[in-house]
Amino acid sequence: MARRNRLPFVIIAIIFVLSILVVVPLDRGVLGGKGVQLGLDLKGGTHLVYQADFSSIEPGTEAEALTGAIAVIEKRVNALGVSEPVIQKLGEDRIVVELAGISDIEKAKSLIGQTALLEFGELVEDDEEARWVDELGKWKPVTAVVDGEELELSSRYFKENTYVSQNDFGQVVLAFEWNEIGSQMFEEITQRLLNQPLGIFLGDEPLRGEDGRSIAPIIQSVISDRGIIEGLSLTEASELSRLLNAGRIPVPLTPIYEQTVSPILGSDFVDMSLMAGIIGLILVIIFMIVYYRFPGALASAALMFYVFCVLAIFKLVPVTLTLAGIGGFVLSIGMAVDANVLIFERMKEELRLGRTLGAAIESGFNRAWPAIRDSNITTFIVCAILYWLGSSIIASTPVMGFAITLAIGVAVSMFSAVVVTRTFLRIFAGTRLAQKVALFSVYSGRKND
Amino acid sequence: MTDIVGKRFWFFVAAGAVILFCIISLGHFGLKSGIELSSGSLLTVSFEQPVSEADLNQELADLGYGGAIVQHTGEGDFIIRTSELSDQAKDQLEAGLAARFGEVSEAEFYSVSPMVASETTRNAGIAIAVAAVGILLYITWAFRKMPKPFRYGACAIIALGHDVLVALGIFAVLGGILGWEINLMFITGILAVVGYSVNNTVVVFDRIRENLIRGVSSDFETVVNRSLVETLSRSLNTSLTTLFVVLALLFFVGSSIQNFAVVLLIGIVAGTFSSVCIAPNLLVVWEKGGWRHLFKRTSKAATSPDAL
């Protein structure tokens, strides 16, 4: 082995061994600790996109409101015990939520969608003013004037320390404290509405107790700092308390996109795409060896290097693998030999012109390089555009995944052809086998047709 | 040496015929868009008991979903496509189906609002336009040292237009006959084909550039033909290896990335043809004095002393 080949060979061997250690086994990995990350289409789960409506808040505070909404959703989802949820801002006014493999997606969705705002009402006769209607009558929001401003009473003025407790009769109660403004309002309101019912509403609906009836306690004394809500079941009270403490989502969110995949469907695809990858790889290797003989075998070795190296990168980055992403990777196996093909065709031409093997290898690589470079740049351009397309509207993981895996594949394939195959060929050129040009499917004395 | 450039008349005729076919099929069938591009909901359900498609259609109509499209995918498995369903509407629909047909479980749910659908359609258009302009500029830049570099970019883009049109045309037929829909993965496939096909074209152009610089012949047509022949086995071999893996994807994974794999399949074949038979030949026609002589056959290539 010539000296100048020794270092590249050692480096390649080290990268190869490390890659294998990272990759095998696929679901764990000795190095890096983690298994391959699978997208929701493969492991099941739900991908939701919400549109925020900023019309009700002050202009200029939109970004803050969105960040606030994300924080609240995070708290709520975490309370549900979902592993590694993804909750992110998407553009200026959207939120994307990804929940993996959870069994109770409906529950999660209802938690995310909750505005979690308790509002309070007083009875009215007038239809015009009424916001809520139930078996007890028509209700309008109860208001109080604070610092010259008329405000509607709601859980907005709760401290975030509500808790579930029991009253003297052993009934479940949800206990809360008012903050400073809330205290002023509640004092004023309880004075005004003494001995009248106070309606409690969650969104468009009255808050209903365990017995299904609207909860509307009669105000029996003037209270300022705290209060309790009776009649809820233990589960309802705990859930409400959690929601209230997690905080309120500051802007209304509308679901605009949902994709839910069951885990059972996904797991089949992992095996099938693995099979497709292996079969594709074998076909490519057979073709390369049959057509290019010995260099084809070297290119196949380089291709194995390529496969493990790319998988190792997927695991280490980590790249979330979706079905389309795996498709991109399998596609890149077919494309990865392209640079090798370009180089070998060049080498054959040089050999036919009567060059020595060493000279043919060097000039083959040098002259194939501009074509390899220029042609792969167009693939990178397309990958960048695809990534933008995928990320722009719904953060589509399949499209982004395809763009990323294809880009990584093309980059590694350039490296593997230009560095790995070349080093293998150079080492080989120094051996006695190299005298047999027929190994290169070029026959000595054959004329250029 | 094989004469590819001299046969350009036939290649243009073949490409023209295919494009004509594709335009007619697009006009006749149109493209069926999936919910990602036209909004709506897809609900995949499976029933414990056997349910007939007719009964399901009837029940859906009774529940107020007369416009729903039902697809029978297996034993008791159905895909129901409706307009966009809210969570409540979906729950009611499932409850209604369960009341009529017994135990029903939801395997998948996919819902796209009209806003998302129209934005996706718009951005897909932008992406394809930006890709075309980006590639045109890039190739013009990559061949900046050549005389008239813009021609290389323009010919590559025309070849791409051919590939995309062929993919669209065939999908129009598949949509018309088999009900295949185009979705975001289809667009992704189209863009991947764009990248792949232009990659092939650049390799051929690159060889033309090299042979022009080396001065292998003073006749442009001869240079182009020689470059084509020299890169021919590479063009075919790379396409073959890529076809192998795409076929493996199609046969072993199928269903959910079927559209994607088929677009790639069409694109690789069309892209290889256009990179070899269209783009370089257009370059020759342009060089030979413009488009008036697009189909004029010259016997020069065959008899040129430069041709080996």
Image (cartoon, coloured by chain):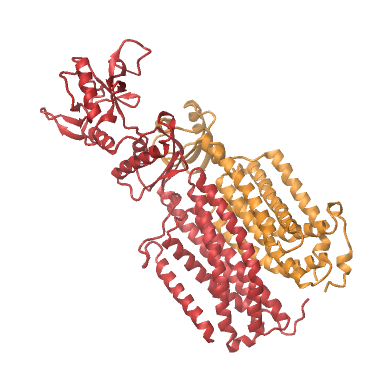
Chain colours: A red, B orange
Left or right of B153 on screen, residue A247: left
Residue A65, percent across and down? 38, 37
Residue lying at 50% horizontally and 83% vertically, measured from the top left = A6
Residue lying at 52% horizontally and 54% vertically, measured from the top left = A402
* Residue A287 in sight in this render: no
* Residue B87 in sight in this render: yes
Left or right of B289 on screen, residue A405: left
Residue A110, percent across and down? 35, 35
Does residue A82 lie above or below A253 as drawn? below
- Comparing B174 with A371, the one in front is A371
Residue lying at 79% horizontally and 72% vertically, measured from the top left = B215
- Comparing A417 with A58, the one in front is A58
Q: Residue furthest front?
A: A147
- Comparing B305 with A155, the one in front is A155
Q: Residue furthest bottom?
A: A432
Does residue A435 lie above or below A279 as drawn? below
Q: Residue furthest left?
A: A168
Residue A410, percent across and down? 56, 63
Residue A365, percent across and down? 63, 75
Q: Quadrant of residue B90?
A: top left
Q: Quadrant of residue A426?
A: bottom right
Does residue A288 lie above or below B287 as drawn? below
